[in-house]
Image (tube, rainbow, N blue to C red):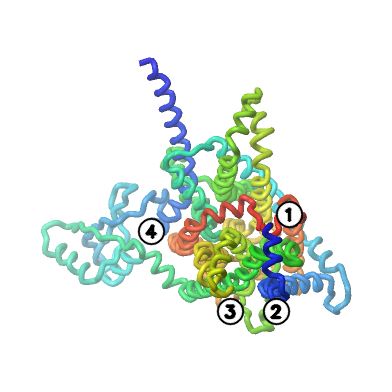
Amino acid sequence: MNRNPIKIGKLVRRTIFYLFIVTLAVSIILPAFFLVSLSFLSTRESYSYPLPLLPSLKTDYSLTHSDRGYLLSVYDKFDKEFQTVLDTAELKKMSVYMEAQIGTPYSIPEIEGRIAELENGTEDTVFFSARKNLLLNYTTFFAITRDAVPALLRSLQIAGLTILVSLSIGGMAGYAFARYVFAGRDALKFSVLFVRMFPGVAIALPMVIILSNMGFYDRPIGLTLVYSVGSIALTVWITASIFMGIPESLEEAAQVFGATKWQTFLRVTLPLALPGLAAAAMYTFLGAWTETVSAIILTQFNPTFPVVVYQSLLGAVGNVNLAAAGGLVLAIPSIIFTFFIRKYIQQMWGGVTI
Amino acid sequence: MTAAASTKRFRDFKSKAVPYLLIAPVVIYYIFFWIRPVLITVYESFQSAAGTFTFQNYVLVFTDPNFMPALRNTAIIVVFSVTLEFLGALFLALLINRKFAGSTLFLFVAMVPMALPAVAVAAMWLTGFTAHGWINSLLYYLGILTEGAKIYWLAGSEWKLLALVILIDAWQVIPSMMIILLAGLQNIPEEAIEAGYVFGGNFITVLRKITMPLLGPTIQTAIILRLISAIQIWLIIVLLVGFSRMPVLVERIVYYYKEVPNLDISLQMASGYAIIVSFIVSMAALLYLRVSGAFGAKKEAAQ
């Protein structure tokens, strides 16, 4: 009995704590939620105000006779009434409108079926509903945005090449940092850290001429060379800490049993380092996949995917739903990879040094 | 100890060469693709069109009517966003500082804003801050805005825009900084905090004399890395209000290089701004290397 007040107090405190956590989580995630929601809105929905909080999954239509042909109306959930959107006799126009503006693909034969119902039935209005194609904005973004598909492939190619360059070059140096004492070690460590923080945009400008001379300007290999500057530094840092975490005694044991140094590295060190190397690769991917300013400077006719989304946003007064779809395609790989390497990101920020 | 073992193992000359062979690619790469472009930029910034030594390029940048506004805006964004982000993150971290059910999920949610590419973040807020965007819609559904009333977020003074940019950056950064401070807080031994209270300290004194000093290195790193990114904020501004409306330093580089590429002075201006940005960022980076102890790093060599 007399312990009840304490329990209640504890309960109240816990409830308040969780309310606080939930509020915080909601305010963090809310803008992202709206971006997702917006990317599923039909063009008509995205022009309405207030914007619907959730995309509709289907649309209710009504069809009736008019002087010119047929009157197509759409049920508006906000105003709670049917609103006329089209007055036409052309079925093709109707079908195109239903797909492009409302997001509900509806074929001409299907429309003919509804018209037959209208002609043969006793009612002067036919009601029907059509399912929405939720992925329409995504397919439309890639269909109508010039360069979107090649840019996506190019971005993947650049990210892959950057991973290759920085893991091989940076990984070797990381191993040297972890296992050897050598002259100039501190100087190199210093410059690696410094380069990691140096603004990429400052390298991008002079690289325009250097890459042009090499014939690499406006090509994926050119951007790879620029991105690798920063990502090699990052990879050195990550791989050094990975190799330091693998006890040297394991390598020594392998050599006692007669393995050569090269065999030891391939059979013992490398397998143990693989998860960490994967993290380094993902980190590099994140940098190359999202980088914008150097890509804007170093591309002309062959932009990367972030540049394409940037350009579609820069001009976008309308079609925000399409731009949102493009933005999400860009964001999803980043979020997935961040999930896998969140531990390393936190360590970087927390100031772990080589 | 390890150093002694290493010397024993790698006594012969062949082994001594190994580390240098391993680091050679990095060194060569940096000479070609980092030192060379940087030196070229610096060299050319002192060259006139006729190829003689001149300060004229810098005079050109410093007398650009948008130079002072760009510098001022950048400084304001850096100072206020980093301060707000640090205090906000510290406040939240101190409030949350404990393990709770669902913390893994919460911590991941908190990482999401940082994970988003700048362009996606801009898409998110651009669609939010337009007059018929989701922010006004949400305010309407919450009953704060009456029907037909809209807030024109992107219209009005530069100060309002600066505040918006700082708030957007805070949204993106505070959650992650909070996680880092949380991790730091949870590494502080409980005895240290308890001892503070036992010796008569209150919450504030314990925070000031024990918690903060122990968090010190974590805080320094997080703040300086944030500072470096904040100096380079530009994309969100350009996508919200376009070029030249609220100039910042990096925005000027893109503006001159990509928006008005055909002026006589486009390249000089872009390079000039790039050098200024590099200089400021380098100062911050050197500060970081100094406080993180990279200068006197001999003691931690080879573990």
Quadrant of the drawing holding the C terminus of chain B: bottom right
* Residue A42 spot, x, y in % from top left: 37, 60
Parent chain of label 3: A
Element type at marker 4?
A: loop
* Residue B288 spot, x, y in % from top left: 72, 53
- What residue is rendered at 88% in x and 73% in y? B53
- Which mark sits nearer the N-terminus, 2 or 3? 2
* Residue A267 spot, x, y in % from top left: 50, 71
Same chain for mark 4 and mark 2? The answer is yes
Q: Is residue B158 left or right of residue B125?
A: right
How dense is the environment of label 1, judged by Cα within 10 Å: few (below 14), some, or many (20 and up)?
few
Q: Viewer-nearest of labels 3 and 1?
A: 1
Q: Is residue A37 left or right of residue A247?
A: left
Parent chain of label 2: A
- Inter-mark Cα distance, 4 to 3: 33 Å
Is residue B56 visible from the viewing direction of this image? yes
Is residue B33 visible from the viewing direction of this image? no
Quadrant of the drawing holding the N terminus of chain B: bottom right
Parent chain of label 4: A
Q: Are dots 3 and 1 in contact, CB under 8 Å?
A: no
Q: Mark 3 points at which residue?
A: A219
- What residue is rendered at 28% in x and 72% in y? A92
In the rendered structure, find residue B299 and report the number of the disc placed on it.
Answer: 1
* Residue A250 spot, x, y in % from top left: 55, 63
Q: Name the residue under label 2.
A: A210
- What residue is rendered at 81% in x and 65% in y? B60
